[in-house]
Image (cartoon, grey):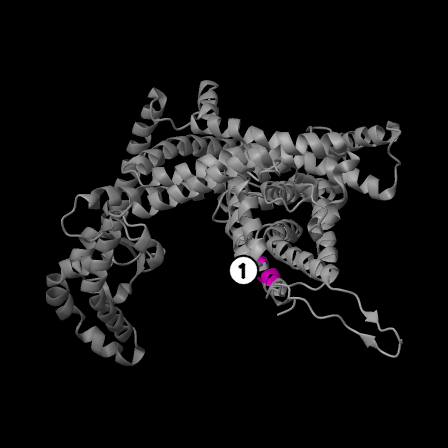
Amino acid sequence: MSGAALGLEIIFVFFLALFLLHRYGDFKKQHRLVIVGTLLAWYLCFLIVFILPLDVSTTIYNRCRNAAANSSPPESNNSTGSYATIAPVPRQHPCFKPWSYIPDGIMPVFWRVVYWTSQFLTWILLPFMQSYARSGGFSITGKIKTALIENAIYYGTYLLIFGAFLIYVAVNPRLHLEWNQLQTIGIAAANTWGLFLLVLLLGYGLVEIPRSYWNGAKRGYLLMKTYFKAAKLMTEKADAEENLEDVMEEVRKVNECIKYNHPLRKCVDTILKKCPTEYQEKMGRNMDDYEDFDEKRNTYPSEKSLVKLHKQVIYSVQRHRRTQVQWQILLEQAFYLEDVAKNETSATHQFVHTFQSPEPENRFIQYFYNPTRPWFYRILAVVLSIFSVIVVWSECTFFSTTPVLSLFAVFIQLAEKTYNYIYIEIACFLSIFFLSICVYSTVFRIRVFNYYYLASHHQTDAYSLLFSGMLFCRLTPPLCLNFLGLTHMDSSISHRNTQPTAYTSIMGSMKVLSFIADGFYIYYPMLVVILCIATYFSLGTRCLNLLGFQQFMGDNDMTSDLVDEGKELIKREKRKRQRQEEGENRRREWKERYGHNREDSTRNRNVHSDPKESNFSDGNTNWSSKYTRANNRTERDRIELLQDAEPLDFNAETFNDDPLESESGRYQPGGRYLSMSSSIIFEDI
């Protein structure tokens, strides 16, 4: 099993990152470099979280092995020197090789590749790709130029921070600047920025995640929140539609101004390809390709203005499509929650849906999350709350080594005494997994206006995907160092002269910057208590609400107004969908009842049009038209209801003697008969 666990986790984490990226990104429409860059960033960050418990168990085994080697007595020779005698073997040391043991030399190389690749992505490649994807340039050269200009200030800021640390080391007479120390300074600068952001996100997630599950078990809470979201989303949806109309109007003016032989016509064609299909068809019909342009008579937009317009088109189309999809998803959620509220008072003990869901229901989720059994969410909320309390306590006490107050360190040290590697790996995995969920879920939830927004169902734009990859790469290394500090596996925290983990050895000794290692890394995480208290009392939500950003608050008049507005919107959409389903059901019933009659009439029409039987049809036309066709007038109208509202071709020589058709229809030269009754009935339906 040597190295097998590492290989299995590498494969598993890859498919996990691919699944999440498929849920939020769009593999068909987004650029391949954006998909590959985001996938690589997510994959490396998830890989660090999953592999770190294996590093901890391997380090504990290596410590045990080194202790056993140091405690074994050396060989000694007898007085004659003829042969060597070995002292009696002491009692066997209790350490044994774990099932997930990773051979020596693999983990340092692995961590070095993973860490520096993630740092290259977050500080150099992903910011450049972000500006490149958001650029409105029409050529690769133009996009690269725009990306370099936008990132000049970005790179200059971080170089300034790194230069400040560099000057501090150079001025300090006790420190000698070497390559390893220079590398440690860069790592310390990156981890300091990541830890600053980590505590903010962690303080929010530790409270909000358990509370969200607890509120999910409340009757009516989710439905009220869904009504609130519907009112806000409708405002955003209307704004997105208005913005798209304004941008399309600008595109229409440019399209009519720049003709086919203008030098910038290729740029206009590129912009048109990014527009929705209905706007492309409308602009194509109004365009005269044979009209030449006149430079003296008209004023034409510059290439710079077209680049700006191209960027606006990409943003407005993406935003409009995202709001449309989110609105449909929110409607399905609201309809389901209304069905839950309706079926709670039902005596049939059978869940009845108002509308059939297009996706099949998950039986596993349906079993645990039943509208009549909210106990599952309550139990989960209590368990998560206990984990949150343990994390907060450990963050405030992990620097204490005598006695050991951090609960994470207590659990790991108890397992280390018995060398129970399975327990060590499970405890480490659950601990770091919970920390990662609190941090990463906050990254998925936060929204910076409309520039950064992770939306599911393939509605996340390239800018937000790359930005999330940057955040993950910046948050994961300080998250892992914080976890190693909580478990006292970091020698700079435990102050024990023991073998460090392979991950800690890659980071180097933070003693180069003592005010960072002994001050900021230890005391700054205590601020998580203040952030948890602020999140519990919703201080941030209240501040945003006072500033005009509408937030869901149960004791607020604005929230009540938006809930009522959202409820009316959901009712209107439900009535609209019910009318659509009733119309479809009515058409389906007509088709099932009278569809075979249409087939018979079509077959008879083909028989009448056969030249071999023309004499027979001519001889019986008058008799059939006066009696049979006149008596079946109602039946034929029902058949026409199922047909398209288009003119029907009839043979004028065959059916010109039908007095009923000449009165109710309209006959045109050339044998074309236009039915008016079928289209009118179809519009009524």
Residue 381 appears at what percent x and percent y? Answer: 38, 42
Please, is residue 498 above or below residue 672 in the view? above
Q: Which residue is mark 1?
A: 422
Q: Secondary structure at mark 1?
A: helix
Give the quarter of the figure containing the N terminus.
Answer: bottom right
Q: Tally the marks.
A: 1
Q: Residue furthest bottom?
A: 612
* Crowding near the residue tagged with mark 1, few <14, some 14–19, many ≥20 C-alpha atoms within 10 Å: some
Q: Would you say the magenta stretch is mainly helix, strand or loop?
A: helix
Residue 324 appears at what percent x and percent y? Answer: 44, 41
Left or right: residue 471 compared with residue 355: right
Residue 476 appears at what percent x and percent y? Answer: 63, 44
Q: In front here: 556 or 410? A: 410
Q: In front here: 618 or 171? A: 171
* Amino acid of disc 1: Ile
Q: In front here: 32 or 177? A: 177
Read off the magenta span.
9-13
- Residue 103 visible in the shown view: yes
User: Within the magenta stretch, is there residue 12?
Assistant: yes
Residue lying at 64% horizontally and 49% vertically, measured from the top left: 41
- Residue 304 visible in the shown view: no
